[in-house]
Image (cartoon, rainbow, N blue to C red):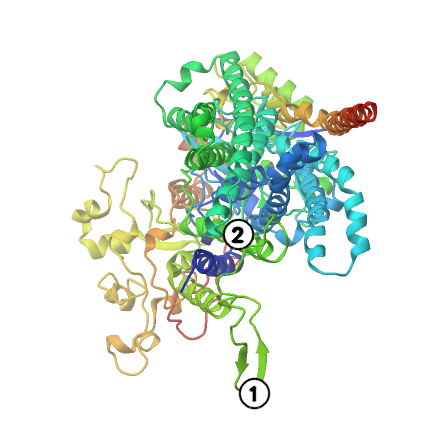
Amino acid sequence: MMNRVQTSKTILWSLLGFAAAVGLTRFVFGLGATTNLSDGTPWGIWIGFDVLAGVALASGGFVMTAIFYITKREEFKPLVRPAVLTAFLGYLAVIFGLMFDLGLPWNIWHMMIYWNPHSPLFEVGWCVMLYTAVLMLEFSPMPLEATNRYAKVREFLMKLRLPLVIIGIMLSTLHQSSLGSLFLIMPHRLHPLWYSSLLPVQFFVSAVALGMMMVALESIVSHWLYRRSADTTLVAKLAKFAAWVLGLFLAIRSVDIAASGEIAMIFEGSREAWLFIAEILMSTVIPILMFSIKRIRTKPAGQLVGSLLVVLGMVFNRLNVGGVAGLRPDALGYVPSLMEIIVSIGVVSAAALVFMFAVERFSIWRERPQDDQADPYARPNFDRAAEVWLGAPAVAARNKYSLVFVLSFTLGIAVIPGDRLESKGVVDAVVRKARGGQILQIDGNHDLFGTPFNHAAHIDSLGRDSSCVKCHHMNKPMDEQSGCWECHHNMYTVSDAFGHDWHAGPDGANIACRQCHQGERRAETVKKCAACHTDQLPPGATISIDSYLAPSYVDAMHGACVACHRQVAAADQTKAGLPQCAACHPKLPSERQLPFADFELSPRTVNPVVLPEAPADSLAENGG
Amino acid sequence: MSVAILTDVTKCTGCRQCITACKQTNHLTYDRPRRWQERDGLSAANWTSILQRPDKHFVRKQCRHCLEPACVSACPVGALHKTAEGTVVYDSDMCLGCRYCMMACPFGIPRYDWDRAVPYVRKCVMCYDLLKEGRQPACTEVCPEQATIFGQRDQLLAEAHRRIRENPQRYVNHVWGEHEVGGTSVLYLSDIDLGFLLGTSDLGDLSLPETTRLAMKAVPPVFVGMGAVMYGVHWVIRRRMELSRRASEKDEDDE
């Protein structure tokens, strides 16, 4: 029979399994393959949720220690240890989650040796590092209690309690507010309803309220999960405090928005305006109203709904600041990928599992939760192979958790979209202008890899004078010709786009039969196109040409005109003006010459594509 | 000494020689359009691009090498720094990949190796190693129209104002980069408005590092102040409890 605890743990282990699969993928294939981050939105939910919201959610540690140790409110004692544990795990989760977001996470320690005190992020990094150490010292008496050894260490740590608490509050004040300072430098990104020079103050005040509500929520949930007696009176007191702090937060924001004359923006009906209204209602207005009514504040259901609203609302606030309420019309719209969401869920699941591990072993609460499965009369495990009695298992149902984790991990690996990883983010692009001339070297993206395009051969094969319209659909806006891919759907497969007679004929390439056909002259014996056209993509590659941004009209035109202009100018002294820019661009000064004395249509000396000897079956790496 | 680049939009023919020169000099790989690229031609393998505006106006986009760069101020480890010569360069050995520089840049310049397992921030460094050899950047060296030229910033500013003075009807009377976000080392002359190069037009002449400077200055006093307040509150409350305990003991003694 499964109880609530075991069911929850099974679910958490399963989520962790999925997250492990995705997390592994992220490190093997990079951020582009797994996330929807882009050059326009380099920060996503791994910053907005895992870091900004994570740190704020963990602020219960410093708030509760302040209430208990500084203002001596002894009645809050039962909530202090869970708050310190939550905070410690919260910070560990933030650091752990950050590892997925950082491009070079193994360099995170560089903050210790390379200093840039101008950077708010530098300050946040140091504070988080130091505060996590403080939290570890505040937390470590709890596991030390569980062992009978190291009593002196524990006594020493208990003596350090007050200085540790004060240092913890000092550090928290700094980095909770500095997370807001991070965004001061980007007025060009953050919507005016969120951007404010008071962001650091707002972040700090909201973190205090959020910390209290997170402690309350954690108390309510663990009460349900472990069937403990509820801390209803304490939570009611916390709710009252929180309502005041939320009120302060609301006042600061209202005054700030009013002072900067942005009130009208709230009602303009834009996406950001609705986000703002939802956030304010959820995080402050509704909870304040609920908590100011005593009948709601003292009832478990009211406490659950109120604290949940604050927690969700403030997380929403951090997500909005972290990029949802952006201000970049030109930026690509960011919606987190499923893989990003799974990793974030996995980090939270891991923290929850460690939390459950800790409360079951150390005295975090007044009472130790009883493991329903721990039957004192249960028979110990028997290992058949060694024929020994192993004693009672340390973790109930550990086989089940392992199985669930491994299955989820496997399933996760199986369902990760392989084409997304394989594509390396390459998207279809419209082939742009190229026309005129005999052979154009089309290299529109200036990657120094061109494709020779034989214009004359295309005219011949498509029907002479009537052939133009087959490619030059002049009715297409911004596109004076069709892309190659409109006919050559699949390059490097046998298709009627291959001009056999042109290749064989004396007017064309004039290639002897045996140069292409090994043995019999059949279609099956022919070499791949790319065996000769080595400047193209690897043989065997089946690639739609629209994924390869080809031509540049400018280069094509210059390449087509310049060589001939030069020849004529060299031969005929009366036409010396031909190589000048002004010959074609009348607005330009006449003395200016085209620079390309030996205009190479596409220099191919840098980064050649390495062709495998045998035709490869799959799309090879894209070189470079 | 501070070097700079002056780009005259009215002279640019959009031949893109600067892009090719940039690629060859900086050993950039070839590039394909990727999901994460913005539509401005810049990418991890394209450090400069030509933006085409209506009526055959070509605007070359590149790192502006701000006088007070937001990216340099934001980087937590100082991997980006403004050199004595005036270029903003990047040290990949220091970088930890937080991408705060990309968030902070008002021009949206720094790009990321999103497709690599070991990614770095990539952007124009004004061919810093060429500058060290006493040469000019590849893009200005190769420009056939001298639409983009290299020189000392004050001299280029004087040249820009001279061109406007001599040809007032040809140019908008504004040198982009003279004052924007505190001034940049890449200057533009144009006959069309270039406000679109900035993320939002209302940034004005605000130097972005200034926005965090005040908050960062408040850090030490807030840190010490919070500690003092907390200890003070603790001391007062403990003292009060002590006094009330003594008072109650005294009451008991009196009885």
Q: Could you say where residue B28 lies in the image, as x and y percent from the top left? A: 55, 50
Q: Could you say where residue A587 lies in the image, as x and y percent from the top left? A: 43, 25
> What is the three-letter code of the residue carrying label 1?
Glu
Is the N terminus of chain A in the top left, top right, bottom left or bottom right quadrant? bottom left
Q: Chain of mark 1?
A: A
| Circle 1 Cα neighbour tier, 10 Å, few/some/many (<14 / 14–19 / ≥20) | few
Is A75 situated left or right of A526 in this image?
right
Q: Could you say where residue A136 lies in the image, as x and y percent from the top left? A: 70, 49
Q: CA distance from mark 1 to mark 2?
A: 36 Å
Residue lying at 45% horizontally and 20% vertically, measured from the top left: B192
Where is residue A487, by image quadrant?
A: bottom left
Q: Nearer the viewer, residue A70 or A297?
A: A297
Of label 1 and label 2, which has the lower sequence position? 2
Q: Looking at the rendered structure, which numbered label has been put on residue A90?
A: none
Residue of label 1: A387
| Circle 2 Cα neighbour tier, 10 Å, few/some/many (<14 / 14–19 / ≥20) | some
Q: Could you say where residue B216 lies in the image, as x and y percent from the top left? A: 69, 28
Q: Nearer the viewer, residue B48 or B251?
A: B251
Q: Secondary structure at mark 1?
A: loop
Q: Nearer the viewer, residue A422 or B6?
A: A422
- Can I make out residue B54 in this image? no
Q: Nearer the viewer, mark 1 or mark 2?
A: 1
- Can I make out residue A330 in this image? yes
Q: Are labels 1 and 2 assigned to the same chain?
A: yes
Q: Nearer the viewer, residue A528 or A469?
A: A528
Residue lying at 58% horizontally and 81% vertically, measured from the top left: A389
Q: Secondary structure at mark 2?
A: helix
> What is the three-letter code of the residue carrying label 2?
Ala
Residue of label 2: A352
Total numbered labels placed on residues in the image: 2
Question: Is A75 above or below relative to A355?
Answer: above
